[in-house]
Amino acid sequence: MRNAVLIFLLAVALTGGHLMAGEALTGHISDAKCGAAHVDHSAKSIGCVTGCVNGGEKPVFVTGDKKVLQIANADKVMAHLGHKVEVTGKVMDGTLTIKSVKHLAP
């Protein structure tokens, strides 16, 4: 039993306390070029993020505290560019793998 607890604590430490599979994280979908600059949900920001992604920039997830995470499966967020969302998934080494996305009101 003691070994199981130690393994669990080690796993939590290695993930840095980040999102575990199935947990929710709220933030905005932006682009790699602009990062946290476009999290105000304005028409200008949504247009800029959409334009940058359509121009080849990768979508990113910006947390509430403005931390920018790469997205492993960007196809999950293409309908949410520039918007506030709640995602479930897993963060590993600064990359978010999304299981589900829910659009949130601004």
Image: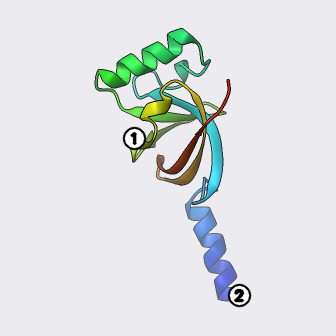
Percent position of residue 86, x then y: 62, 41
Kind of residue sitting beneath label 2 = Arg
- Specify the quadrant of the image occupied by residue 102: top right
Who's the residue at 65% across and 39% down the image?
A: 26
Specify whether 80 is left or right of 40: left
Identify the residue position indicated by label 1 in the image.
74
Residue 84: percent from the left, percent from the top? 61, 30
1 relative position to 101: left or right: right
Residue type beneath disc 1? Ala
Mark 2 element type: helix
Depth order, front residue of 46/65: 46
Residue at (54, 49) in percent of width and height: 100
Helix, strand or loop at label 1? It is: helix
- Tags 2 and 1 in contact by the CB under 8 Å rule? no
Residue 88, image x and y in percent? Answer: 58, 51
Q: What number is the disc on residue 57?
A: none
Q: What coloring was used for the rendering?
A: rainbow
Q: CA distance from mark 2 to mark 1?
A: 40 Å
